Image: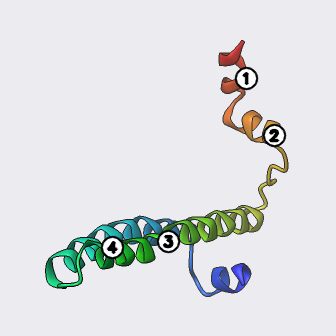
Amino acid sequence: MIKTLHKRGLKSHHMYTAGLTSIGLAFASWALSNQLEERGMDRADRWGIFVGEWAPTFFAIGVAMRLEEMREEGKEIPTQRGEMDERVGGRASHAMR
């Protein structure tokens, strides 16, 4: 699925943007539901939570897309936490000492 999305032109930054947008939409849907519907705060909370649950999915797909982009660019993908620290420049390990 990720390869198909990538081949169709979707990039990781698109998914990150969708995640951030869904956070804003969660707040907006909560606020609008709270003001416009007569069913009260419970209904508004449900709308906000429903839309807010999309954000982690978009961010997770964005990470998968980024890994696919790295694979396409020929970059080696880190497989362990220590490898990621080394790629950052080893600053984290030196700062801890």
Assign the C terminus to one quadrant of the image: top right
- Is 91 positioned to the left or the right of 55 in the image? right
- Is 58 positioned to the left or the right of 33 in the image? right
* Residue labelled with disc 4: 25
Q: Nearer the viewer, mark 2 or mark 4?
A: 4
- The residue carrying pointer 4 sits among few (fewer than 14), some (14 to 19) or many (20 or more) residues within 10 Å by Cα, namely some
Assign the N terminus to one quadrant of the image: bottom right
- The residue carrying pointer 3 sits among few (fewer than 14), some (14 to 19) or many (20 or more) residues within 10 Å by Cα, namely some
Q: Is residue 4 above or below residue 74?
A: below
Question: The residue tagged with tag 1: helix, strand or loop?
Answer: helix
- Residue drawn at x 26%, y 72% is 41
Question: The residue tagged with tag 3: helix, strand or loop?
Answer: loop
Amino acid type of the residue that numbered disc 3 sits on in the rendered structure? Glu
Q: Between marks 2 and 4, how big is the CA–CA gap?
A: 36 Å
For residue 29, what is the image quadrant? Answer: bottom left
Return the mark for residue 83: 2
Amino acid type of the residue that numbered disc 4 sits on in the rendered structure? Leu
Q: Nearer the viewer, mark 3 or mark 4?
A: 3
* Residue labelled with disc 3: 53
Amino acid type of the residue that numbered disc 2 sits on in the rendered structure? Glu
Residue toward you, 22 or 94 = 22
Residue 28 lies, in percent from the top left, at 26, 72
Mark 1 or mark 2, earlier in chain:
2
- Residue drawn at x 44%, y 67% is 17
Q: Between marks 2 and 3, how big is the CA–CA gap?
A: 31 Å
Question: The residue tagged with tag 2: helix, strand or loop?
Answer: helix
- Residue drawn at x 69%, y 30% is 89
Q: Between marks 1 and 2, how big is the CA–CA gap?
A: 11 Å
* Residue labelled with disc 1: 93
For residue 71, what is the image quadrant? Answer: bottom right
